[in-house]
Amino acid sequence: MLNFFDSFHFSKAFKHKFGYAPSAVLKNTDQHPMDTGPHN
């Protein structure tokens, strides 16, 4: 268990820690995946 009461609590804690909402991360990874390496 991650010790979050609900999705709102998680979202608020995430935004406080990182300065942006978790939904912003999902939107960014759809357009620009961060875990891709150089293409051959």
Image: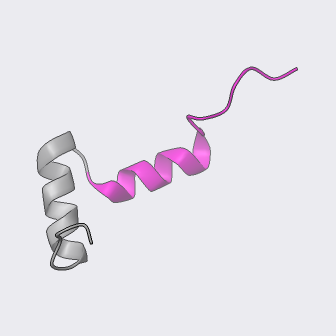
The colour mode here is one colour
Q: Residue at x 37, y 51 (%)?
A: 24
Is residue 8 one of those drawn in magenta?
Answer: no
Q: Residue furthest right?
A: 40
Relative height, residue 19 to residue 24 (above, below): above
Q: Residue at x 60, y 45 (%)?
A: 31
Q: Residue 11, position in %: x, y?
A: 22, 63
Q: Is residue 27 left or right of residue 37?
A: left
Q: Is residue 10 left or right of residue 22?
A: left
Of residues 1 and 30, the one drawn nearer to the viewer in this rendering? 1
Q: Residue at x 67, y 32 (%)?
A: 36
Q: Residue 33, position in %: x, y?
A: 60, 40
Of residues 20 and 1, the one drawn nearer to the viewer in this rendering? 1
Q: Residue 25, position in %: x, y?
A: 41, 49
User: Which segment is the magenta one?
Assistant: 21-40
Q: Residue at x 19, y 74 (%)?
A: 8
Is residue 23 one of those drawn in magenta?
Answer: yes
